[in-house]
Image (spheres, rainbow, N blue to C red):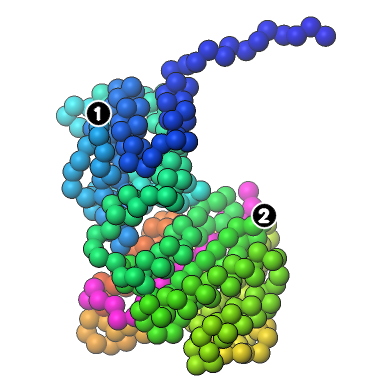
C-alpha cells in the first residue's frame, strides 16, 4: 500500500501563539504567568491585558499584578462588563474609543477561575477562536500553579482571614463544577471567618457524590472537627461503599477523635447522572429543598439518624427520581436561623421566597447560588453570627 502525502506540519500563527504558552508552562513559576500572557496578547495585537481573579467574598474581580499586565482597581462583579462575563461564563465585547475590550471567562472544569480581558483594534471570528483557546490554557495554568504558590491566595483576599477559615478554604473542592449532565455550585459565609461548615463533592464515572456538614461550635475547634469529618467522608467514599457505611466511617472518626459530647450534622448524597436517581442519608441536618420548574416544590424530608460522632443507628437511604433541570438546595442551619436586620429569625419561608425569585431569572447554578447567599447576607444587615453555607446541585439530564 502506497503511503499518502504527509499532512502539512508547519507551524501556523495560531499554533505558535498557543505553543508560546504550552512550551513554557511546565517550568513557569506562578509570578511569571502574567508576563507570559501579556507577551502572548501583544503578539495577537492586544493591549492592556488583565487577568482578573474573584475575591473570597465573591464580590470583586481583582487584577493580577505582573509585568506587561494592566493594573487598575478591583471591579465589582455585579456592576461591570467583566462581572457579567464572570457570572454567565460568556465572552463580553465592549466597544471603546481605541478598539474593542474583550472579556473572556477563565474556565476550568466548569469552575470560573476569573476573567481574561484585552483590547484589540477590532475583533473577528479568528480572534475569538484564538482568544477562547488562550483563555482555556490560562485557566489551566492558574489552577495548576496555585497549588504551590501563595500568590493567588494573597491577591484574592480582601481582608484578614482567620486560621479556621484558612483551614476550611484549603479543604474545599472548587466552588463550582459545570458538566454536561450535572452542575454544582457552593458558597461559604462568612468568607473570611467560616469555621464549622464545609461541603465536598466528586464526580466518579456517572455518579456525583455530595456531602454537606456543620460541625458544632465556632472557631478553630469547629474547623478541626470539620476537617476530620470531611477527611473521613473522602476516605470512605473512595472505597466505593454505600451511604450508610460512609456515615459509619464518619461517625467513628469524629467520636474517636473528639469524644461523645462533640458532633457534626451531615447530609450525604449520591446522584446517578444517567438516570437522575438521587439517594441521600440525613444525620441531623436541615432537609434540602427540591427546586422544580423554577420554584421550591418540597423539602426532601426522610428518616434521619443522630449527627456524626454520637453513635446513631444505621441511617435509612431515601430516594427520589429527579427530572431534567431539577435543582437540589442543601444548606446549613445558619442560613435560616440567623436573624434579619429587624431582629426576626430569617426562617424557611423567607428563604423559599428568595429562592423562587432568583430561580425565575433563569441563570445558572453558580450565579443563583452566589446571588442567594449575598441576598441573604444583605437581609440580615451584612452580619453573620453563625456560618451560613449553601450548595446547589442541578441534574441537567442526558443529551
Q: Quadrant of residue 138?
A: top left
Q: Which residue is mark 1?
A: 47
Residue at horizontal 68%, vertical 7%?
5
Task: Name the chief secondary structure element in magenta.
Answer: loop
Q: Is residue 159 above or below residue 129?
A: below
Q: Residue at coordinates 58% horizontally, 60% vertically from top-left?
A: 202
Asked if one can make out residue 359 in the rendered structure from this viewpoint, the answer is no
Give the alpha-carbon distance from disc 1 to disc 2, as whole Å.
42 Å
Please state if 321 lies on the left or on the right of 156 as rendered.
right
State the residue at coordinates (34%, 44%): 115
What x and y, as percent, mark residue 389?
41, 72
Can residue 165 be seen here? The reply is: yes
Q: Nearer the viewer, residue 330 or 43?
A: 43
- Magenta-tinted stretch: 381-399
User: Percent position (x, y) of residue 132?
Assistant: 42, 34
Question: Dot 2 surroundings within 10 Å: few (below 14), some, or many (20 or more)?
Answer: few
Viewer-nearest residue: 269 or 18:
18
Spot occupied by residue 271 in the image (x, y as percentages of width and height):
63, 65
Q: Position of residue 44 (x, y in %)?
A: 34, 23
**Mark 2 or mark 1, which is nearer the start of the sequence?**
1
Q: Tell whether position 396 is magenta.
A: yes
Task: Indicate yes or no whether the magenta region holds residue 278.
Answer: no
> Residue shown at 58%/11% (left/top)?
8
- State which quarter of the image contains the N terminus: top right
251 left or right, relative to 82: right
Q: Which mark is residue 106?
A: none
Q: Residue furthest bottom?
A: 261
Secondary-structure class at tag 2: loop
Residue for badge 2:
205
Amino acid at each position: 500500500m502506497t503511503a499518502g502525502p504527509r499532512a502539512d506540519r508547519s507551524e501556523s500563527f495560531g499554533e505558535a501563539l498557543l505553543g508560546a504558552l504550552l512550551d513554557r508552562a511546565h517550568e513557569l513559576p506562578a509570578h511569571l504567568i502574567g508576563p507570559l500572557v501579556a507577551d502572548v496578547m501583544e503578539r495577537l495585537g492586544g493591549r492592556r491585558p488583565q487577568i482578573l481573579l474573584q475575591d473570597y467574598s465573591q464580590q470583586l474581580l481583582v487584577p493580577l499584578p505582573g509585568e506587561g499586565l494592566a493594573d487598575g482597581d478591583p471591579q465589582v462583579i455585579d456592576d461591570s462588563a467583566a462581572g457579567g462575563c464572570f457570572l454567565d461564563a460568556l465572552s463580553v465585547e465592549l466597544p471603546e474609543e481605541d478598539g474593542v475590550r474583550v472579556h473572556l471567562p477563565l474556565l476550568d472544569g466548569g469552575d470560573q477561575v476569573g476573567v481574561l480581558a484585552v483590547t484589540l483594534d477590532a475583533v473577528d471570528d479568528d480572534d475569538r477562536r484564538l482568544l477562547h483557546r488562550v483563555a482555556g490554557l490560562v485557566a489551566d495554568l492558574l489552577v495548576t500553579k496555585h497549588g504551590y504558590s501563595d500568590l493567588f491566595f494573597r491577591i484574592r483576599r480582601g481582608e484578614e482571614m482567620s486560621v479556621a477559615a484558612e483551614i476550611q478554604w484549603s479543604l474545599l473542592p472548587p466552588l463550582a463544577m459545570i458538566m454536561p449532565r450535572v452542575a454544582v455550585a457552593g458558597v461559604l459565609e462568612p468568607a473570611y471567618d467560616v469555621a464549622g461548615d464545609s461541603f465536598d463533592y466528586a464526580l466518579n464515572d456517572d455518579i456525583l457524590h455530595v456531602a454537606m456538614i456543620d460541625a458544632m461550635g465556632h472557631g478553630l475547634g469547629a474547623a478541626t472537627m470539620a476537617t476530620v469529618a470531611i477527611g473521613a467522608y473522602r476516605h470512605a467514599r473512595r472505597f466505593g461503599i454505600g451511604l450508610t457505611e460512609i456515615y459509619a466511617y464518619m461517625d467513628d472518626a469524629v467520636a474517636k477523635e473528639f469524644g461523645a459530647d462533640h458532633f457534626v450534622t451531615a447530609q450525604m448524597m449520591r446522584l446517578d447522572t444517567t438516570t437522575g436517581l438521587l439517594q441521600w442519608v440525613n444525620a441531623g441536618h436541615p432537609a434540602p429543598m427540591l427546586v422544580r420548574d423554577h420554584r421550591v416544590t418540597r423539602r426532601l424530608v426522610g428518616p434521619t439518624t443522630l449527627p456524626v460522632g454520637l453513635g446513631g443507628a444505621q441511617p435509612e437511604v431515601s430516594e427520589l427520581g429527579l427530572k431534567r433541570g431539577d435543582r437540589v438546595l442543601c444548606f446549613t442551619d445558619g442560613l435560616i436561623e440567623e436573624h434579619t436586620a429587624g431582629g426576626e429569625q430569617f426562617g424557611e419561608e423567607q428563604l423559599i421566597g428568595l429562592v423562587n425569585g432568583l430561580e425565575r431569572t433563569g441563570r445558572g447554578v453558580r450565579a443563583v447560588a452566589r446571588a442567594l447567599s449575598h441576598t441573604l447576607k444583605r437581609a440580615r444587615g451584612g452580619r453573620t453570627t453563625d456560618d451560613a453555607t449553601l450548595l446547589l446541585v442541578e441534574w441537567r439530564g442526558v443529551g
